Image (cartoon, coloured by chain):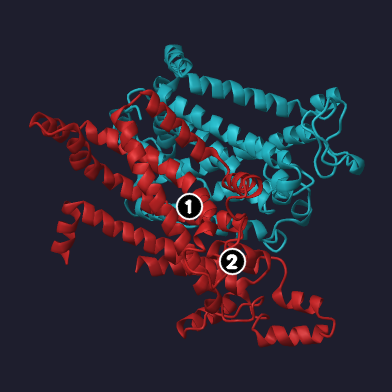
Chain colours: A red, B cyan
Amino acid sequence: MGMAAVLAAMSFIVFMLIGLMPGDPIDIMIASNPDLTPADGERLKRLHGLDLPLWERYANWLGGVFTGDLGFSRTYNRPVMEILLPRLGNTVVLLGLSSIVAILIAIPLGVIAATRPRSRLDGAINLFCFAGISVPPFWLALVFIMVFAVTLGWLPAGGMGAPDAGPFARLEFLVLPVATLTIASLAGYTRFARAAMIEVLRQDYIRTARAKGLGPRRTVFGHGLRNAMLPLTTIIALDFGTLFSGALITETMFGYLGMGKLIYDSILGNDFNLALVGLLLATLVVLIGNFLADIAYAVLDPRISFRALEAA
Amino acid sequence: MTAAAHAIGDDGSNAVRVWRRFRRNRAAMASAILLALIALAALLAPAIEALLGVEATRVDLFNQYAPPDAEHWLGTDEAGRDVLVRLLYGGRISLLVGLVAALGAATIGTFIGLMAGYHGGRLDALLMRTTDGVIALPLLPLLIILAAVDLEKAGVPADIANSEMASLYRIVFIIALVGWTTVARLVRAGTLAVRAREFVRAAEAMGTRPAVIMVRHILPNIVSPIIVATTLSIGAVILLESVLSFLGLGIQPPIPSWGNMLTNAQELATRAPALAIWPGAIIFVTVMAFNFLGDGLQDALDPRAVRR
């Protein structure tokens, strides 16, 4: 229910903002086609309902949504969902891979740093985290392209590979985008993993575990990490929106045909239906990500699932 | 003497203690000095320009992509302009946007956090749900739409909308509009803690107006987290400005900013890699310095907090 409310609010705000954007699609059509007279323009505007006030156009659009009509893309001349769905798949692959890689690296790094606070290794990890948070993502992509594609020639500078190529042939096109997208979130996750772990390791139950003769390894991983995962899950959930913003930059830099690039291109190309529905779909993906993180939280924390079961 | 005076004013010794703790943090001290140097160089850009005998805006198509030499220390760009001096002028814009937008966001966040924390109840629930929503959303596409809105259609007077500085005002405005969430949450948490204290209860009992209590009694006690969060957010704002300008939606040429100096960098990557390196590297270093500075301030202002 909350999701529907967020999407409705988002669609309204974005629709109103788009109404304030320069370049009416019909005006562009007339400007690019000398056979169309201003009278044709008026007729086209009436045909598409573009002469109506903005709120009425929003109502019409919303009515269309409920009958399954999400609108038509001006630049592609196809229903927006037909264009968006394959792009959505590409973005989910990119986001999913980078999230997994980031989490798999961040947790060990955080644990290593937390179990040796103020050591040289901790300092090095800390410096790496500060660098990861501070580097402009588009510039990092550029440096990767310059080093690994232009100078060394190991990896393609961008694109996606042939559409009929197998998943492994396309893998090399994913390396640099995934690496770019991973670094920023990796740094943030590592800092939180370290902070959460330090907090947990100060707790009484850790001392109890050590006192009853449990080895340091099993104490840290069995008792410590499990508890430190809870705050970390929340942080990762809150980060999905930022991750999508990162995907927009990464996809644009590497010519990766995902949703982020599509939204960016459609805003610049005045393809408003596509931009609007794309943005809503992105929001939905982020909300679903949040929701999945909530479920993960319940799985990790028996107290929460217990309460949820009782309520159900 | 008021509570406010107790909180920040009275003892110079408190400031001295903070300074002593800060000074011991080498990374933060180095960052502060570095930022001061960058800011100074940006402020002195016209003087440095004159000293070097180059002009930031002079296009010289016979001298494109010149390598560094005695006249052009970092070489020239695709229009034959001096890269170093343009970086300094770009720094003025990027630092200005960072400072002003971060302060604007902190002001909005402080107001929202005080309202939510002090009044509580439904207002608190509404404001905090909104904050959570803004944090969770994919903000960059929204910012791109905001950056593409026609200012005249939005009712901005034509002389402002068409002025050269319009892109500057606009980017400060839209970053402040979405950047207030961290401060709002911190201020709310601080307000909740402080409003239960005796001096606030006493002020309430004497019939002091809520606005006065918030500004005079609560705010001075929660400045530390606001200062830290604002410092950290300057770095984040500079990054965001660079992204938007790079995408062609932030600061508009001919005004240089570190971000828009990279707009063509992708094509330059093979032709003149140095042009793609310098602006990014200076953004990187500056943002990192602001992050270290914020981190050091946090340790110095709040030594009781767990060392992360």
Chain of residue at mark 2: A
Above or below, comparing residue B115 to residue B75 in the picture: below
Q: Quadrant of residue B220?
A: top left
Q: Looking at the picture, does residue A18 appear above or below residue A113? A: below
Residue A300, placed above or below residue B189: below
Q: Is residue B278 left or right of residue A10?
A: right
The reply to whether dot 1 and dot 2 touch (C-beta < 8 Å) is no
Q: Could you tell me which residue is drawn at 59 percent across and 62 percent down?
A: A261
Reading the image, the residue beneath label 1 is A242
Q: Amino acid at mark 1?
A: Thr
Query: How would you rate the neighbour count of disc 2 (Cα within 10 Å): few for under 14, some for 14-19, many for 20 or more?
Result: many
Q: Position of residue A181 (x, y in %)?
A: 50, 51
Pick whichever of labels 1 and 2 is earlier in the sequence: 1
The vertical placement of A238 against A291, above or below, is above
* Residue nearest the observer in this picture, A191 or A113: A113
Q: Chain of mark 1?
A: A
Q: Give the numbered dot on residue A124.
A: none
Q: Is residue B131 left or right of residue A51?
A: left
Looking at the rendered structure, the secondary structure element under dot 2 is: helix
- Helix, strand or loop at label 1? It is helix
The C terminus of chain B: image quadrant: top left
* Point 69% across, 60% down: residue: B155
Residue A54 on image: x %, y % = 61, 74
Q: Disc 2 marks which residue?
A: A262
Picture coordinates of residue B173 (x, y %)?
A: 61, 48
Residue B271 percent across, percent down from the top left: 76, 46
Report, in whole angstroms, how far the alpha carbon at label 1 lies from the one at label 2.
Answer: 17 Å
* Label 1 Cα neighbours within 10 Å, binned few <14 / some 14-19 / many ≥20: some
- Furthest residue in direction left, as rendered: A212
> Which of the 4 image quarters holds residue A49?
bottom right
Q: Residue at x 69, y 42 (%)?
A: B276
Asked if residue B223 can be seen in this view, the reply is: no
